[in-house]
């Protein structure tokens, strides 16, 4: 029997199962925190009847804040997964070697070859999700054990740990986005067509712009400290 490499990552049933598993996990997280919020508010009402409004407020606020953050993080993860699916449906998996030691700017930053000029490299970063511990563990494994990549590092991508055990979104630095939405001269027509098909040629979000500013400030401080 001859094995044919799928044309896109999402054409592989194993990728579909991995994506669906991540989606179920994010839904479970959102449901847990939503139920926790309802139960905590109910418990706070009982406490209010026992000890007064002031004490009940002191008791309620921390739990409510934690639950709201939990629901928000779960919702953000589901949004990322939706964008990841579009990337997986347009690009095949490419196997990448271990990254080694962390980038000076942080564990999430790394470089990938430019699809049109492989001798050049694009600076990208793993997009954060969850409370941080699981994300850092996944990033550390990708750096030490290698990973599979789907996408265009100039716009967006998805990283999978060995065995498709975890999917991580990759955030580009958006230096290849033109203000008028046209194809940059350094990007081939084929690469641009595929990126448009995946819906990843849009301008950076407010979150990405904020992170880019913070990254630039961090680099400036590091350069000043080393000089």
Image: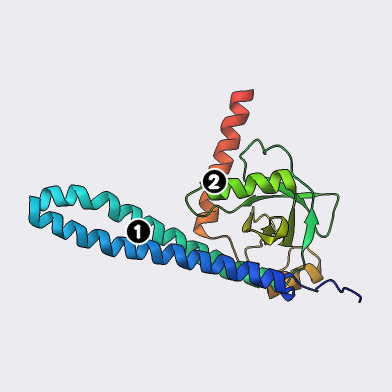
Residue at image location 71% in from the left, 37% down from the top: 101
Q: Which residue is pictured at 35% across the width and 58% down the height?
A: 68
Q: Is residue 157 left or right of residue 116?
A: left
**The C terminus is located in which quarter?**
top right
Give the number of marks.
2
Toward the viewer: 179 or 4?
4
* Disc sitting over residue 68 in the figure: 1
Residue 106: x percent and y percent? 61, 39
Residue 125 % position (x, y): 64, 50
Q: Residue at x 33, y 65 (%)?
A: 35
Give the quarter of the image for residue 17: bottom right
Tell which of 226 and 18 is nearer to you.
Answer: 18
Q: Nearer the viewer, mark 2 or mark 1?
A: 1
Q: Is residue 199 visible?
A: no
Q: Position of residue 45 (x, y in %)?
A: 15, 60
Return the residue at label 2: 213
Query: Distance from label 2 to label 1 (Cα)?
Result: 27 Å
Residue under the point 65% across and 59% down: 165
Secondary structure under tag 2 reads helix
Quadrant in the rendering for residue 114: bottom right
Determine the secondary structure under disc 1: helix
Mark found first going from the N terminus, 2 or 1: 1
């Amino acid at each position: 029997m001859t094995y044919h490499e799928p044309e896109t990552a999402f054409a592989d049933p194993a990728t579909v199962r991995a994506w669906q598993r991540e989606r179920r996990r994010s839904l479970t997280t959102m449901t847990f925190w939503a139920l926790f919020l309802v139960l905590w508010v109910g418990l706070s009402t009982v406490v209010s009847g026992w000890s007064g409004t002031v004490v009940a407020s002191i008791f309620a606020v921390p739990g409510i804040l934690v639950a709201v953050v939990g629901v928000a993080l779960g919702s953000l993860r589901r949004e990322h997964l939706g964008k990841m699916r579009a990337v997986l449906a347009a690009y095949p998996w490419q196997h990448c070697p271990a990254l080694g030691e962390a980038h000076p700017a942080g564990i999430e930053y790394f470089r990938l070859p430019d699809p049109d000029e492989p001798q050049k490299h694009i600076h990208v970063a793993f997009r954060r999700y969850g409370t941080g511990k699981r994300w850092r563990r996944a990033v550390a494994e990708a750096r030490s054990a290698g990973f599979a990549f789907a996408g265009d590092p100039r716009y967006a991508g998805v990283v999978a740990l060995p065995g498709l055990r975890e999917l991580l979104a990759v955030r580009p630095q958006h230096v290849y986005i033109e203000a008028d939405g046209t194809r940059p001269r350094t990007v081939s027509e084929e690469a641009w067509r595929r990126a448009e098909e995946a819906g990843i040629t849009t301008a950076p979000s407010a979150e990405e712009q904020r992170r880019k500013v913070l990254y630039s400030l961090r680099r400036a401080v590091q350069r000043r400290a080393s000089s």
